[in-house]
Each structure stands twice: as structure tokens, then as C-alpha cells.
Amino acid sequence: MYLILVFIFSFFTAHIARGQFLSNEPLYQDPFDNAAGGASITMASREGLMFSNPALIPFGGKIVRWVGTKFNLMGPRNSLLYAYKAKSEGCSATTGAMNGLLGGNSACQESTQDLNALMGKNTGFGVSTTLSGILNNFAGSLVLGQGVDIKVRRAGDPETGMGLPQLVLRAESANALALSTATRIPYSPLSFGLTAKYMALLDTKIALGTELASDKSALKSQTDQIRSGIAKGTGVDAGSLWFTQGKWIDFRLGITVQDIGNAVLKSIGTPCDPTDPDCHSKQPIRYQTMNSGVGLTFHNSTDMIHFALDYRDINNAYNEPMFKRIYAGTKITLRNSLGLAFGMHHGYPSYGVELDAFIFKLSLSTWQKVYGVDPKGDIRKYFMFSISSGFSL
């Protein structure tokens, strides 16, 4: 039966256009899932269930799996580490953060570097919030996420290596309202789930150079790119899960199809002309992807260790290299209150810790993200602090 399901999902992903808007990753993942390498198809947490694999929802063992809100704050790992170290050594956190950005040897060192030291450096910040209710067969979530990536170019044109220095800002935003439904076939380890989502997305770059000070048209052109990068639309995800549970060992196999039929969005800055026969193809698209994951869990009544491996975008709709399509990680739960996670995200180590203090949950996670197709190219190292408040029954 499950082989038939695989065939059906493969059929739906057979003919897909190429291109990219954002990436093959889910619109939202719980920070603890990112700490576990981003492998979430068989072990997503809370709101991540709806965006990674809604078929996970019926297997929670509770009528109310989660009702609550979460706040996530993300920043550059090196700068935050140096800022904390600077405070402990009795100097300014700002000094430490700058030394972390510049790659200094000490958090409190007196920097003798001039502005030239900033050339080629990058940093990024982000914040997101969620409001969710997840029951045994239904779920709803509002996710609001904003981020900015900052990079200083020594030369304006990265291809020719010529031009004046530029400050490149990349604005990223993923906002979504999602509703999910899932069912477990009676007397069977198989479940199915659907998620319908309304998305407001932004992924655009603007380059701010010294020429903008005297060229108002250039400034207007750059700022217009932000509006042009905003797109809104709807999408549908489907998921299935085969879950066999034993006294000490569980096995999970998941398959999902995200953005079924391609989620064609409407760009605010580039409205679609109905008389243009190519209008549809010029709009931003969340391409349909097929994904699979496998998980193995060893557990007793209070402790658990879960191993997971995801293979995303099997049809390679986004034309990304393999290191951005394979995600692997492990979660460890101790006494149902302390969680540890580690894994590989974009080919680099990730790890985190989560404390369940009943009404409040706190987590700290870190992972690396790669822009582009070069695994040693444009890399960001992030820390994320999360606090959530809610309950389950």
C-alpha cells in the first residue's frame, strides 16, 4: 500500500518548472529542529509539524498537542559569543560584537583596524513569532518571520571585481497562516495530512554604494526592488507517515509533497498583465517538491533518542547541490524535560538544547546556512534563542 502511495506522489512531481524562490526548506521550522540538522520530516516539533509533515499530527498521544506562542531571536554566532565574553571580562558588549564580526583574537582588544577591515565581512539578524493550536487531527498557526543579511563588498561588481565598495542588504521574510488536517487510518500505522497556507514572502537584495548619495534615480531603483520582491499567494502541502511503534524501538518513514502543482505567487511590485501570455511564468513561484525522510527512535517511558535523515527536493526543482538537499540529525530527550540536539545542516554541524519548564520552554540553538551552491562560499553562522509559553493535554 505504501509503495502505491510513493508512486502517486512521484506522479504528481513528474513535470515541474525550474527556478527558485526562497529554497526547498519548509517556510518555518522549530529552532530545535534546526539544531537537529533540519531533519524534520519524521520528527518535527510543534508548529514545524504543519510545515514539514502534517501527517505527524495524529501520533502525539495527546488530544491537545500544543496551544501557545513562541518568540525567536536570531543573531550572528561569532558576534554574540564575543559580546557575551566581553561582558564577562568587564568591557563593552558592543566592542565584543564588533571584534567577533572582524575576527579579532580577543573580545576586549582595542581594535586598530580601519574601515578596510569590514570589507568582505557579513552578518545577519532575524526575529520570528508564532501563535499556534495543534489538536489530534487539526492544527492552525500564524507565523511571522523577518530577517536581514548584511555584507560589505570591497568592489561593487562581484564578477569583474571592479567598482566602489557597497553595502549589500538582503531582506528575507516568511509570513504564513496555515491550517492543517490529518487522519490516522484505524488499526494501521499509516497517516495522511494536508496543510493549506497563505503566504506573504520576501527575498530580495539591494546594494547601497557611494554613488547613491548623488544619484536619486539609483536610490529609487534600489528601494523599488524591495517592493518588487514582495509576493503573496496560497499553497498546499501533503504528507504521509508510516509509524510502527514498539516497546523500546519505533520506526518512521515519511513522504511529503510541498506546494502541490507549484504555488504561483503574485508579486506586488510586478503586477500581472492578463493580456501577456507569459504573465504566469514571470511571477514568483514556490516550486513543487517531493521529499522523504526516515527515523529510528529508541525509548523508554521518560527518555528517548531519535535519529533522522531527510532527502528533500528529490525531483531537484530548485536545482540545488546535494549538500543542500540532505539533512541529518539526532534528538535526545531526558526525563521528558531536557532536550539535546545535534546534526548536519547544509553540510555543517548544528546543535542545541531545550528546557521544558512546564508552561515555559526555553531553547538555544546554532546552525550554519549557505547561500548559493558553493559549500565553502557564502556562509552564515547563527545563534537563535527561543522562548515559548503554552500547554498540552
Image: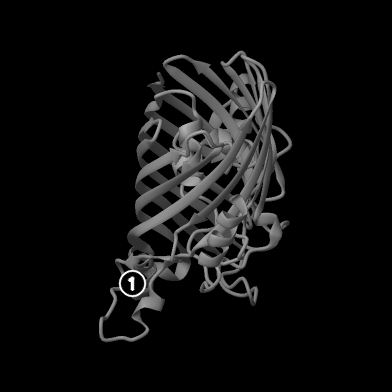
- Residue 61 coordinates in the image, percent (x, y): 49, 24
Residue 179's place in the image compared with 352, above or below, is below
For disc 1, the neighbor class at 10 Å (few under 14, some 14 to 19, many from 20) is: few
The answer to whether residue 175 is left or right of residue 105 is left
What's the amino acid at mark 1? Answer: Lys
**Is residue 115 shown to the viewer in this render?**
no
| SS for dot 1 | helix
- Residue 163 coordinates in the image, percent (x, y): 57, 74
Q: From the viewer's side, name the closer residue of 336 and 80.
A: 336
Q: Residue at x 53, y 73 (%)?
A: 15
The answer to whether residue 357 is left or right of residue 225 is right
Q: Residue at x 60, y 65 (%)?
A: 315
Q: From the viewer's side, name the closer residue of 274 and 372.
A: 274
Q: Can you name the residue that lies furthest to the front here?
A: 187
Name the residue that disc number 1 marks: 216
**Is residue 152 shown to the viewer in this render?**
yes
